[in-house]
Amino acid sequence: MKKFLSALFAAGMVASAADASVVGGTVTLGGGSFVELDSTVPMTIGKDNFNTLDMYAFDELQDYTLTSDLYVDGGVISAGKTVSSHYVAYDPLLWSRQAGSVSFSGKILGVISTTDSLLASDFLGAPAVSYVSIIERGLEGWDRYRVSDKTVDVSWWASTPGDYMRVITVAPVPLPAAGLLMVGALGSLAAVRRRRKSA
């Protein structure tokens, strides 16, 4: 019983540490591949930093509670909501088209894809990443995306400086309290069993 309780407690702690994250992606048109970047490694993004046909994505701030309303394309995420942020980029050397998708572990709440809104939401960026804010940093009128639960599908054309979007997802629900409640319940069960044996 002691070993079981210890294992259960450890599992609860591991689950509580999980973040919403990029879980995968695919390129269906354009010849490149999907690349997930490690956002803890310093890098600059926003103006011809890749020059490849690949689609890039990385995690930004995780489990962040908004202190003010966050404006996304076509809507607002209210202050007080705990969210996780992710960045998707396409930065080819020459004028090129790409289609593909990126999936996340959390449900998508909104997408930020205009130059001004990307700049205004850079506080959600990864601390190790330098975001270069210039004209046409976001998407243009011919670019398209579609959100479906935890996946965003994109179809975009780009050259200099590339196409970029920020994807906001629901932060995972912390589990320590639930885990501790389970441990407490099992502890009570063990106590009852001991009393029965002694009787």
Image (spheres, rainbow, N blue to C red):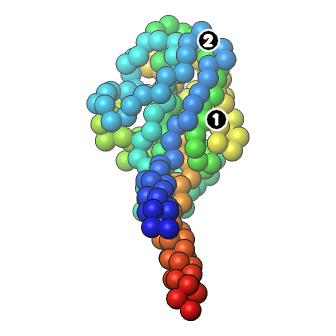
Within 10 Å of disc 2 (Cα), the crowding (few <14, some 14-19, many 20+) is some
Relative to 20, residue 138 above or below:
above
Residue 43 can be seen in this image: yes
Residue 92: numbered disc: none
Q: Please identify the quadrant where the C terminus is shown.
A: bottom right
**At which x and y percent is residue 38?**
39, 31
| Residue type, mark 2 in image | Gly
Q: Which residue is mark 1?
A: 152
Report which residue position mark 2 lands on: 30
Between 144 and 18, the residue placed more toward the observer is: 18
The image position of residue 121, as x and y in percent, is 43, 46
Q: Nearer the viewer, residue 92 or 172?
A: 172
Frontmost residue, 124 versus 13: 13
Q: Toward which corner of the image does residue 152 lie, by quadrant? A: top right
Is residue 80 visible to the viewer in this orientation of the structure?
A: no
As measured in the structure, the alpha-carbon distance from the residue carrying label 2 to the one carrying label 1 is 17 Å
